[in-house]
Image (cartoon, grey):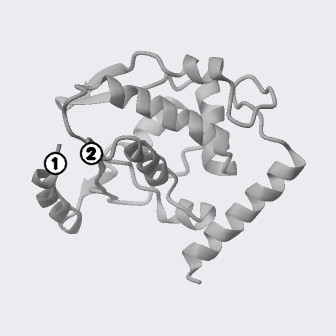
Amino acid sequence: MGIDSVGEFLGSAMRGIRSLVFPPSCPLCGLEESEGCPECIASWRIAPAIRLIDSIPIFSPVIYDARARSVVLAAKERGERLSRTFIVEAISSVVERIDPGAALILIPIPTSKRALRKRGDDFLARVVDEVVSRDSKRLRRLSLLDFKYQIHDQSGLSIQSRERNLNGSLEITEQKGENLADLPSLEM
C-alpha cells in the first residue's frame, strides 16, 4: 500500500467507527437520517448565483454562510458522507441548469499537498467525480490547475481572507495544459 492508500484506509476506518458511535444525521437540521432530509436537500437545490471573473462565468449553488460552512467542513474535515451528498446535490443542481444540451467540463480546485496528506484524499476531485458520474456523456472532470505557491489553511478564514489567500495562487502549468488537447474529444 502506498502512503495515499494508507491515509485513505485510515480515514475510511475512522468514519466507520464514528458512524457506529454517532449515527448519521442530517447536516442541516440534525435529525437522524441515513440519507439526509429530503426537505433540507431540496433547500440546496436553488437557482445558482452567477458572477463573472475575467469574463468567465462562475456558478455558485449556495451562499457560503455559516450553514454552508458547517456542511463543507463536516464533509472535508470529518469525512461525513451525508454532508458530501449535500455538496454533490448542490453542484449537480447547478450543472442541470446550465445549457442542458451542452457538454461541460468541471475543473476542481486542487487540494494542497498538506491537506492531501492530512485527509488522505482529494476531496473536491472526488465530489466532482460523483457529479460527473450522474451524466458522464455530458460531463467531464479535467484537472488543469496547480498552486503557484503554498496557501494558508482556509478553514478558519473569512470570505475576504479566503479571497486574498487564493487570489493569484492558481495556474495552469504546461504539463496540465496538455490536458486541454483532450477537450475536443468530448462526445455527445
Graded by Cα atoms within 10 Å as few (under 14), some (14 to 19) or many (20 or more), the crowding at tag 1 reads few
Residue 60 in percent (x, y) is at 40, 27
The local secondary structure at tag 1 comes to loop
User: Tag 1 or tag 2, which sits nearer the N-term?
Assistant: 2
Left or right of 13 in this view: 163: left
Give the residue number, with chain letter if any, for mark 2: 137
What secondary structure is marked by label 2?
loop
Query: Which residue is pictured at 66% across the width and 39% down the height?
Result: 82
Q: Residue at x 16, y 48 (%)?
A: 187
Asked if one can make out residue 156 in the rendered structure from this viewpoint, the answer is no
The quadrant of the rendering that contains the C terminus is top left
Q: Identify which residue is drawn at 42% across, 33% down.
A: 92
Quick check: 172 left or right of 123? left
Q: Position of residue 16 (x, y in %)?
A: 77, 57
Location of residue 84 with respect to 149 vertically, above or below? above
Q: Can I make out residue 123 in this image?
A: yes
Residue 176 left/right relative to 12? left
Q: Amino acid under label 1?
A: Glu
**How dense is the environment of label 2, judged by Cα within 10 Å: few (below 14), some, or many (20 and up)?**
few
Identify the residue under disc 1.
Answer: 187
Tell me which corner region of the image, top left, top right, bottom left or bottom right, holds residue 70: top right
Q: CA distance from mark 2 to mark 1?
A: 7 Å
Q: Amino acid at mark 2?
A: Lys
**Residue at image x 59%, y 84%?**
1
Kindly indicate the quadrant of the structure image that contains residue 139.
top left
